[in-house]
Image: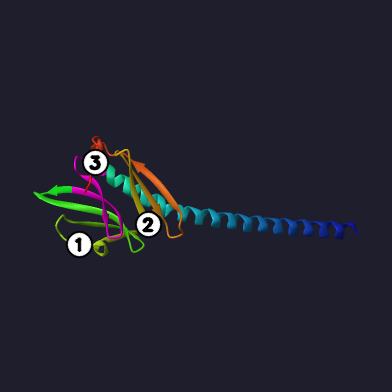
Amino acid sequence: MSGKLYSALAIFLCAMFFLLAMGLTLLSAEAYRNTAAAASENDTRRTALSFLVNQVRRNDAQNSVSLASFGDGDALILSETVDGSLYKTVLYCFDGQLRELYAAADSGLGPADGLAILPLKTLTISVSDGLLITFTVTDENGTASSASVSPHCWSEGVAAS
């Protein structure tokens, strides 16, 4: 009788181990799903802000960085002269997308002509003390994030376009 009892106890312990291991696996999978979803949601906002800040840093030269309205919202304007002609890169939000438009300054292109970069609900650009640009982006879920940059070329204050 004791041999059958030991066998039953061993089977019971193995079954309990299996059930606990499966429960732990299912809980871990749910935690991973939640973490991955949060990271994906944050990724769009972080990428958009990083892109905007790095574009300002990359074009940080006198009379190269300015702000304006474009379409129905705020826009970052990056100017450069190539072979004697003025070109502008306009970064703005239109039709649910962060967009980039690179063209000659007098091209007459509109907001719909830009290249879609990331899905983004809104882009708001503000200036503090004439020296600090603050970008606020809102993703498709309505969550907002901000980042600021101070261009060296604005040592005399904000450039207007």
Q: What residue type is labelled 1?
A: Leu
Percent of width and height locating residue 4: 86, 60
Q: Which of marks 2 and 3 is nearer the N terminus?
A: 3
Q: Does the magenta stretch include residue 69?
A: yes
- Answer yes or no: do the residues labelled 3 and 1 have beta carbons within 8 Å? no
The first of marks 3 and 1 along the sequence is 3
Q: Using the image as rendered, state which of residue 132 and residue 41 is in the foreground.
A: 132
Residue tagged 3: 60
* Callout 3 amino acid: Asp
Q: Dot 3: few (<14), some (14–19), or many (≥20) neighbours within 10 Å?
A: some
Residue occupying the point 20% across, 62% down: 109
Q: Which quadrant of the figure contains the N terminus?
A: bottom right
Residue 49 located within the stretch drawn in magenta: no
| Front residue of 116 and 75 | 75
Which element is circle 3 on?
Answer: loop
Amino acid bearing label 2: Thr
Give the farthest residue toward the right. Answer: 1
Q: Which mark is residue 109?
A: 1
Q: Residue at x 48, y 52 (%)?
A: 39
Q: Nearer the viewer, residue 141 or 71?
A: 71
CA distance separating discs 2 and 3: 24 Å
Region rendered in magenta: 58-79
Residue in the image at 24% along x and 57% along y: 101
Q: Where is residue 118 in the image (x, y as percent from the top left)?
A: 35, 58
Residue at which label 2 appears: 122
